[in-house]
Amino acid sequence: MALHPEQIGRMIQACRKERDMTQTELGERLGVSSQSVSNWERGESLPDLALLVDMADIFDRSLDSIIRSGAGESRRRVPVAQMREAIECIHRLHDLMGREHFIYQTMVSALDRKMNSEIEPAFTDPVVMDAYICEALIACVRDGGDWVDLDDVRRNIASEKPREWTLKALKRLGMK
C-alpha cells in the first residue's frame, strides 16, 4: 500500500481545524515544532508512526482512518440509500418490538452516545432524518475510513442545509 503524504496532510489539517487547533498547539501537544506540522499538512513529509498514534488520540479518530486517508483507499463505499435504510431498520425495531424492548433501547442508546445526538426525532421528521444521515455519513468517513460519493449526497439528501454542510465536511475529510 503506497501512502500519499498530501492526502494524509489534508486529513491532519482537517482534523486539526475541526478541533480549532493551531499548528503551534498541535505541535506542542505532540512535542514537535509548528514547522513540522506545516510540513505534514503540505505533504512534504510524514509524521512518525508514534506521532500518528498520538494524533489519532488527539483527534478521536482511528489510526486506520488516518493511514487509509493517505492510501487512497477505504474499506467500503457507503451509499446514502444504504445509510437511510439502516436508520429505518432501527425504526422498524421500534415497531416490531416496542420502544421499551432492550434490543431497541440498546441500539438507540448506543447510537445516541456515539453520534452525540438523538436518533428518534429522525423517525418522524424528514429534515432531521436527512441531517442524521449526513452526520452518520461523516462519522463513517472520519472514524471508519469509509468513502462517500459527493454526487450521491447531492442527489439523495433533499434538505439543503444538511446537504451543503455535509458536502463541505466531506471535502475537508478528503472526499472528492
Image (spheres, helix red, strand yellow):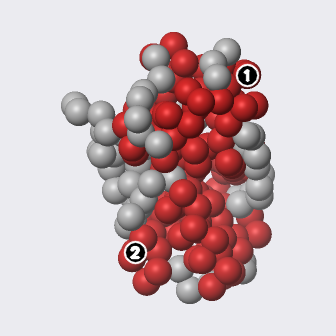
Label 2 amino acid? Asp
Question: Residue 146, labelled with which disc?
Answer: none
100 lies left or right of 148: right
Which quadrant, please, contains the C terminus?
bottom left
Residue at screen point 30% across, 34% down: 3
Q: Residue at x 65, y 41 (%)?
A: 16
Q: Where is the N terminus found, in terms of image quarters?
A: top left
Q: Which residue is mark 1?
A: 28
The local crowd at label 1, few if under 14, some if 14 to 19, many if 20 or more residues have their Cα within 10 Å, is few
* Depth order, front residue of 73/125: 73
Q: Earlier in the sequence, mark 1 or mark 2?
A: 1
Q: Is residue 140 above or below residue 144?
A: below
Can residue 89 be seen in this snapshot? no
Which residue has dot 2 on it? 152
Q: Position of residue 131 (x, y in %)?
A: 66, 71
SS for tag 2?
helix
In the displayed structure image, the side of residue 73 where residue 23 appears, left or right: right
* Label 2 Cα crowd, 10 Å radius (few <14 / some 14-19 / many 20+): few
Q: Are discs 1 and 2 less than 8 Å apart at CB? A: no
